[in-house]
């Protein structure tokens, strides 16, 4: 279940950033994009940091 959520959340974060970028380059849109990308990266880092090394 976790690998599926990693793929879905990465794709969802990219799609949201794309739609925000299509709205224009106002400071508020850039702030929204920053928050979206930061949330996606922190969630993915949190999930990937929990995995144990297998070698």
Image (spheres, rainbow, N blue to C red):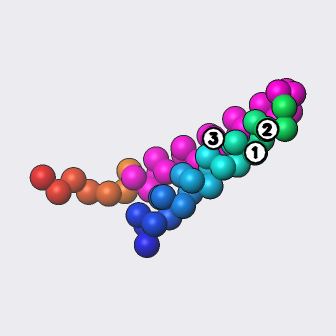
Q: Quadrant of the N terminus?
A: bottom left
Residue at the location (69% across, 42% down)? 17
> Tag on residue 37?
3
Q: Could you classify mark 2 by the number of other residues whose Cα lies within 10 Å: few (under 14), some (14-19), or many (20 or more)?
A: few
Which residue is the site of mark 2?
A: 22
Q: Nearer the viewer, residue 51 or 3?
A: 3
Q: Measuring from the top left, give residue 21's x and y in whole percent.
A: 76, 36
The part of the chain drawn in magenta is 25-48
* Disc nearer the start of the sequence (2/3): 2
Q: Is residue 38 magenta?
A: yes
In the picture provided, is 17 more to the left or to the right than 20? Answer: left
Residue 48, x across and y down, in percent: 39, 52
Cα separation, mark 3 vs mark 1, equals 13 Å
Main SS type for the magenta part? helix
- The local secondary structure at tag 2 comes to helix
First-in-chain label (3 vs 1): 1
Pointers 2 and 1 in contact (CB under 8 A)?
Answer: yes
Q: Quadrant of residue 42?
A: top right
Residue 2: in magenta span: no
Q: Which residue is farthest bottom?
A: 1
Observer-nearest of 20 and 52: 20
Look at mark 1 in the image and give the residue it sits on: 19
């Amino acid at each position: 279940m976790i690998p599926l959520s990693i793929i879905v959340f990465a794709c969802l974060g990219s799609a949201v950033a794309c739609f925000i970028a299509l709205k224009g380059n106002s400071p508020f849109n850039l702030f929204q994009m920053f928050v979206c990308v930061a949330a996606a990266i922190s969630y993915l880092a949190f999930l990937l940091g929990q995995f144990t090394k297998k070698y």
